[in-house]
Amino acid sequence: MNRRLAIATRLGFREQFRRPLLIVLIVGLPFFFITRSIARTEPIPRQISLPGGEVVLTTMRELHGASMAAITIAFIAGLCGAYVMRSARAADRRLVIAGFRPVEAVLPRLAVLAAATSIAAGVSLAVTALSFSPASWPAFAAGNILVGFTFACVGVLAGALLGQLGATYTVLFLAMLGTGILQNPMFGDGTPKGLAYGFPDYGAGRVIATGAFGQEFHAAPQLGLALAWMTLLVAAVVLVLRRTLATN
């Protein structure tokens, strides 16, 4: 089984390296999207509340610097989930016909998706560091990585259920409405509420805010919520992909 997983994983990475558009999306988009957005934002004073009741005074530019990485990572990871997994279906079915178990075809695809998401997160965080320095890099990075893996799973599920076009609109809607507006401290009174609680990256977003501006980490409940969402989504992805391969 280990040898089969290694072969399938190697083939999965080789397939994606043949897609230059995906590489450009993962590496090129963060440089343009994040840097330009932060540079065009005025440093207007802004007060926000963090988990644990801490209130901090910052600026709109700093807030944009803290939020743009998550928005970018969410969008790129979601698209990777939708397109990488959907494009791999035919190859995975051939592996199953050749004698691979469905799980032996699914796990390598998850490894490819995890690698793409990690690269997108790493590039986005590196670009962010050029214009913004969070209070705690570990917490800030962890929150953004959680956002990435959460949206990667959302992209996979949307791609499996809605097709590529439907998945693209779904990822864009969730990334822009949830991560970009409802959970963005630049809007409202700076504290997400209402519909924001229903989005799967709500907990990760509060971890990001704490890592960006908090003097101490008080977002343990939100971190637990983010991990619970990610666990649930990963289980759903494995179940959906296994059933897809097993019934074709």
Image: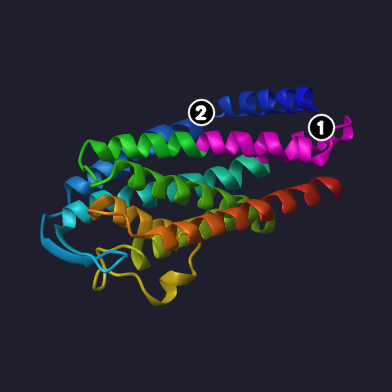
Question: For residue 108, which quarter of the picture?
Answer: top right
Q: Quadrant of the N terminus?
A: top right
Position of residue 119 relative to residue 80, above or below, is above
Residue 11, which numbered label?
A: none
Q: Which residue is mark 2?
A: 20
Judge whether residue 40 is colored magenta: no
Left or right: residue 131 versus residue 114 is left
- CA neighbours of label 1 inside 10 A, class few (<14), some (14 to 19), many (20+): some
In the rendered image, residue 106 lying in the magenta stretch gets the answer yes
Mark 1 — residue? 95
Nearer to us of marks 1 and 2 is 1
Identify which amino acid the numbered label 2 is placed on.
Pro
Secondary structure at badge 2 equals: helix
Q: Residues within 10 Å of mark 2 (few under 14, many from 20)?
A: few
211 or 73, which is in the foreground? 211
Q: Element under label 1?
A: helix
Image coordinates for residue 28, horizontal then vertical, percent? 38, 34
**Part of the protein shown in magenta:** 87-116
Q: Is residue 220 in view from this perspective?
A: yes
Q: Examine the rendered structure and indicate whether residue 128 appears above or below residue 225.
A: above
Q: Single out the residue that lies furthest toward the bottom.
A: 194
Residue 153 at what x, y percent from top left?
58, 51
Residue positioned 23% across, 65% down in the render: 54
Q: In the image, residue 212 lies at what x, y percent?
A: 26, 51
Question: CA gap, disc 1 to disc 2?
Answer: 24 Å
Tell me the amino acid under the disc marked 1: Leu
Q: Position of residue 42 (x, y in %)?
A: 12, 55
Dots 1 and 2: beta carbons under 8 Å? no
Quadrant in which residue 223 is drawn: bottom left
